[in-house]
Image (cartoon, coloured by chain):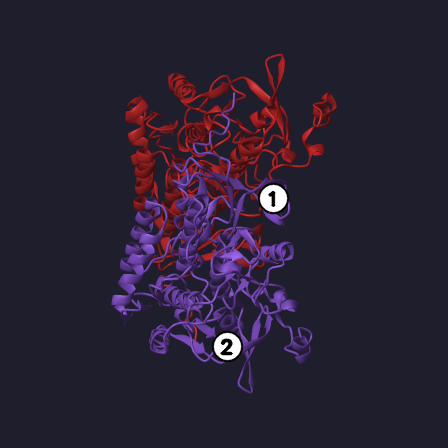
Chain colours: A red, B purple
Amino acid sequence: MFKRPKPVTDPTHRVVIIGGGFGGLHAARSLKRVPVWVTLIDRRNYHLFQPLLYQVATGALSPANICAPLRSVLRRRKNVEVLLGEVVDFDVDDRQVILRDGRVPYDTLVVAAGAQYNYFGNHHWQPLAPSLKSIEDATDIRRRVLLAFEAAERETDPELRRAWLTFVIVGAGPTGVELAGALAEIARYSFRHDFRHIDPAEARIILVEGLDRVLGTYPPDLSNKAVRSLLRLGVTVRTDCMVTDVQPDRVRIRCGNGIDTIQARTTLWTAGVQASPLARRLAAATDAQMDRSGRIIVAPDLTVPGHPRIFVIGDMARLDHQTGAPLPGMAPVAIQQGRYVARLVSRRLAGKTLPPFRYRDRGTMATIGRSAAVADLKWARLSGFPAWVIWLFVHLMQLVMFQNRVLVLVQWAWHYVTFNKSARLITGEVPTLKPPESSRKEEVTESAELAHH
Amino acid sequence: MFKRPKPVTDPTHRVVIIGGGFGGLHAARSLKRVPVWVTLIDRRNYHLFQPLLYQVATGALSPANICAPLRSVLRRRKNVEVLLGEVVDFDVDDRQVILRDGRVPYDTLVVAAGAQYNYFGNHHWQPLAPSLKSIEDATDIRRRVLLAFEAAERETDPELRRAWLTFVIVGAGPTGVELAGALAEIARYSFRHDFRHIDPAEARIILVEGLDRVLGTYPPDLSNKAVRSLLRLGVTVRTDCMVTDVQPDRVRIRCGNGIDTIQARTTLWTAGVQASPLARRLAAATDAQMDRSGRIIVAPDLTVPGHPRIFVIGDMARLDHQTGAPLPGMAPVAIQQGRYVARLVSRRLAGKTLPPFRYRDRGTMATIGRSAAVADLKWARLSGFPAWVIWLFVHLMQLVMFQNRVLVLVQWAWHYVTFNKSARLITGEVPTLKPPESSRKEEVTESAELAHH
């Protein structure tokens, strides 16, 4: 009555891939003509295009626009099966992946479970300053941002209203910079005619960065251009500042010797990088070394040292560049690593091998609101409108499903012409906007700060 | 520092509208040139196009495609303000609406808080058989449907797998019929190549209806045509059947004298109608009468008898047709009532009045999957492809925002050509697909049924 699986290839070699992000998905796709049976395991049923997640968080795109159902993407790959499940541990001796609800045997294992942002030991800040890694994060941030404007519209106390209209973004990497630009843009343009009691353009967007410049991994002249674009949009950029405390209604930062308290009702976190907790399980099972961000330090062929059957790729892997710096946690690195692993598996089946993985850096870029971006393409450095056009084109073409390319293009064109962002839904529980008086008049005490460090 | 509200009209007459659905939104829009200050209160920040909600539940459209942010829609109406808030009660003597967090005074009140589905006293069934009224409902149903196929893919016991692939829809009104058709379509076409261990086309969709025919408010010949279309898609239609028990893994129905137990892991509820709980508060405050569905029985001018300042419109109002039958809970009724109230308010300000409200019935329609629909246009009855084209056109044109019309059109065209539905995201908590053995082997005991009655 039910069809049994019909592997078109010889299933004697089983490749199990954990994670359907850029690395895992490209590894699965690149194993197309290789005589192996591939099982792709993910907790989610979709591949997420993380570089555009900030556009969901700011109401420009819908979640489905940047997601591709894994089964759809891989439907024609007859040697690939998709398994919805959560990996909790590894049994290296028996060559099995342990799910929360079962076990899957492997001959070759590819671990590509990604990374999260890093609260540097202050994980209790997360509910107060959510980060942006998943669709749920994005809709939660969208909800917080929209509710902040709604609360400001109803608030009569000017000081509290100002706190509702203050948004702090911690971390000025590409996501932080793009999020700050997009927030400034919706406040200034999209919401222009929407409120009756506030002027949304009075919103303050404050971008806080611990390093001495934004976009720390980019060339310094592009950092300067990015800052200029941010300032033009009204964003306040504060470099060399560390966050020392986060509360529901304020953020404390230390800049040099001074301590500053920002009254803000919305704080968003896009700083640091921390490998998936699965890395710790894998390290325990294989005696692998981890770096300070919890990433597995891999051999030049992306295997776990001493475990030639186990690969770690993407944001979970720590591999140093030819120049000595670690490879950044970016989509192109993960994609190239996924393809390399597929090639190496194929070679090994033929009794051959491959030279070590080499990352080919084709450049990096970031947008800052409307018609402005910075791009370091290695053979050229661009900023402003030309960089923005390239940014649009590259990101559109990288979307996995053609339908999403069309939908995103239509929406971007629409936003460009009308300034109007339509995916502005506050979903979930019905909020009570004005909290009772008692909780609103908390005193700013030094002890509150000390309690957190 | 902050802009104060600048009412462009004389704000001496305040119209408060509760609910941004079809009735409330059209009342607010139609008060455009009337010298009143309008406050539209909703718990949500968007207007929801409910007739297409089933397409979100089946992964064809994204939530934002059928939602229009109320502030965006009303941004140019300078005499309208939108207030995000939840109304909990009425103070009729002081002419105030009581929010969970404040009060809003009115001179004229328009209550348009809508309705829900009716579990007929078995409200404990709701978590087991969710209904489809909100965006959260739709993404929850989408999640359940997608997870059922994922669970079937991983289940090895044929009987349990069959239960995962069985979907019961209770109530064969337009929403139930459209949902059944769409579910059958994704099982047969959209998922065709997506699974390796199951054939999704084996899914059973069972539509259960208490009356003797589907689409009970339509002419009988259209009901017959709808059934034929459903059968062609493989839907099982069971009329004259009442649900007597709902459990996580089965539904019990009584058809005539026989009792039948359907082993089904997914049950959806689209039966009956029950006014918003706010109707009860309003009835208590105004001594208004309610009908059995909890709707306020209104006077021919849509006011609450004895309270000429208070209107009730849309699904919350009970008003009988010229023919004696109650007006159905449909968008056109609510829209015409919203416009009528706006006209009457305007006339009253000029010291005049209006004849009683008369509903102009322009017809009803429903789709059944791909290329098939039934339409009763009063001057013609259509079915099949012509009805489907009209259905598409009418629904597309009714979407409030032009951008959504474009996006929905692109997606419909895409689905028509490729059969592929892209908004197939399972969002929320990570599921455990195989529950522990103990909870799966519950015995079907008569006492379980008795416990619920």
Q: Which residue is drawn at 33% across and 32% down?
A: A391
Mark 2 or mark 1, earlier in chain: 1
- A360 sits left or right of B142 in the view: left
In the image, B59 versus B218, the foreground residue is: B218
- Return the x and y of residue A286 as percentages of the image width and height: 57, 44
Q: Residue B210 carries which label?
A: 2
- Residue at the outermost top position: A257
Labels 2 and 1 share a subunit: yes
Q: Which residue bears the numbered disc 1?
A: B96
Mark 1 residue type: Gln
**If the image is split into quadrants, where does the C terminus of chain A sit?**
top right
Q: Which amino acid does label 2 sit on?
A: Gly
Q: Distance between the residues labelled 2 and 1?
A: 42 Å
Q: Position of residue A409 (x, y in %)?
A: 30, 41
Which chain does the numbered disc 1 sit on?
B
Q: Nearer the viewer, residue B315 or A53?
A: B315
When the figure is inspected, residue B447 is found, relative to residue A221, above or below; the finding is below
x, y (%) of residue A402? Answer: 30, 48
